[in-house]
Image (tube, grey):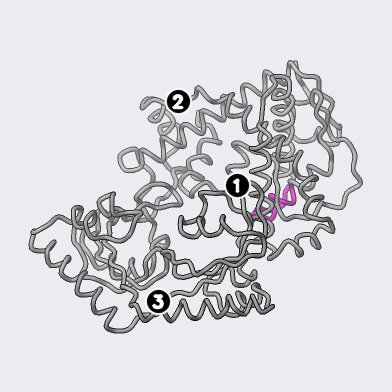
Amino acid sequence: MMRPFAIMILKYIVSKLRFFATLLVFSTPMFSLSQPAQVIDKVAAVIGAEILLKSEIENQYQQVLTQGNYASVDLKCRVIDKLLSNKLLLNQAKIDSVDVAETQVNNELDRRVAYMVNQVGSEQKLEAYYNKTIPEIRDEFKPLIRDQMMIQSKQSDVVSTVSVSPADVRSFYNSIPPDSLPFIDSEIEYAQIVINVPISKEEKQRIKDLLNGYRKRVEDGEEFSTLAVLYSQDGSARNGGELGFVTRGDLVPEFETAAFKLRKGEVSEVVETQFGFHIIQLIERRGEQINARHILIKPSFQKSDIDIAFAKADSIYKAIKSDSITFSNAAQIFSEDKNSRYNGGNVVNMATGTTRFDADEVDPAVFFQIEKLEVDQISEPIQSLSAEGNTAFKILHLKSRSEPHKANLETDYQRIQEAAKVDKENRVLEDWIDKKINATSLQIDEEYSTCPNLNRWYNKK
């Protein structure tokens, strides 16, 4: 008989692991910008030495609703089941002395606080949102982060030996009724050669003079953040140029080297990166993490600069067309896109880690050109933007194009294999939970006994 959960797993694998499907498989507590639900708190359950509060249930349920799910009794019952499972995992993690390093907890806490700061715009706004100081916010969330990491560690340990064979994948696929198989839209695979438009010496000097002028204004007393809002061409401009806390290794090397040398409040000299030209101000440093703000100015290009890049791209295109060089070799030698040049020009979908793209995942200018190509054809150079957002020319090679179809083993084996593994991991985890329920002391409020999926918690053997 088909496991209903298997259909859902395959569908969410196809749809790139949407949030709630992930929650249903491997749920961990939330940590986000959500105000606590206004409830009269009480203990909802005691699992071993762990307590589940009614407020935790309400907060988690409201968070799930913000992800586009519809309110229902069934949904709330599933949320409760997963929260109970998390408490069971946490209880066992503590019994088994699962260790989470303090540095890991602090690093994750820094990352999430920085994310929230970026969401609201500044540390001051975040403090106003919670009516707490940043240190108080960190103190409040640190135990939650530690618990999450312990749950994740124990959960990973439970399923660590799970693997799937080709027979498992076929069995999983065959267990899905044909009318329940998800529909997969047309997908393409393509390669590219990217030739950036060069920046003239005059343009570089113009930008450096401009940024040095802003630097002088900061030295004379103007706020860096105000100048960033007014002049920066980066998306962080709306936040006064602030990037939030980042760890060493998160930034491009030139930017990182300059930023980590700064003292608090100090402004860097002009820094050139693949994105353009910057001046940087250090806000705060915590060990190997910094919070900085910057002003980015991107270069403008004269027609003569554009003509130079086109001529280079066109000569490469003609060499490939005349079989003087293969597309793959030309990409490795000439392409200026670091993400694809050493991969034969093949472009990787960063959302899925594969080389397959849905139509809506490809830059419209690129897709418009690819749509005209037959499989294995290459395009003439087209003016586009590089990964860094600068003007460039691209030569495109359409590697494959699939027709819309229902998921099948021949063309979608990797997806189905992933779904089969997730399904097997989930069943192993559920079996583990069932066994631990019977070996763990439980007290659960009768208020939730009407949830059919909670019977195992109330009727332990």
Q: Secondary structure at mark 3?
A: helix
Residue 33 percent coordinates (x, y): 72, 55
SS state under label 1: loop
Q: Which mark is residue 163?
A: 2
Q: Label 1 crowding class (10 Å Cα cut-off): few <14, some 14-19, many 20+?
A: few
Instruction: In the rendered view, tell whether residue 300 sits above or below residue 92.
Output: below
* Count of numbered circles on the image: 3
Please give left or right for residue 276 compared with residue 5 in the image.
Answer: left
Q: Amino acid at mark 3?
A: Lys
Q: Which of the 4 quarters of the picture holds residue 334?
A: bottom left
- Which circle marks residue 236 in the picture? none
Nearest to N terminus: mark 3 or mark 1: 3
Rendering coords of residue 372 (x, y %): 25, 68
Could you tell me if the residues under marks 3 and 1 are in contact, i.e. CB atoms within 8 Å? no
Q: Nearer the viewer, residue 226 or 450?
A: 226
Pick the front one: 4 or 126:
126
Q: What is the crowding at mark 2: few (fewer than 14 residues within 10 Å), some, or many (at least 20)?
A: few
Given residues 382 and 334, the one toward you in this image is 334
Which residue type does callout 1 highlight? Glu
Q: Which residue is mark 1?
A: 288
Mark 2 or 3, nearer chain start? 2
**Dot 3 crowding, Cα within 10 Å, few <14, some 14–19, many 20+:** some
Amino acid at pointer 2: Ser
Residue 387 occupies quadrant: bottom left
x then y, percent, for residue 361:
42, 60
The reply to whether callout 2 and callout 3 are in contact (CB within 8 Å) is no
Magenta stretch in the rendered image:
61-72
Using the image, tell me which numbered label, if any, was put on residue 204.
Answer: 3
In primary-sequence order, the first of circles 1 and 2 is 2
The span from disc 2 to disc 3 (Cα, nearest Å) is 54 Å
396 versus 54 height, above or below: below
**Image-based side of 187 in relation to 118, left or right:** left
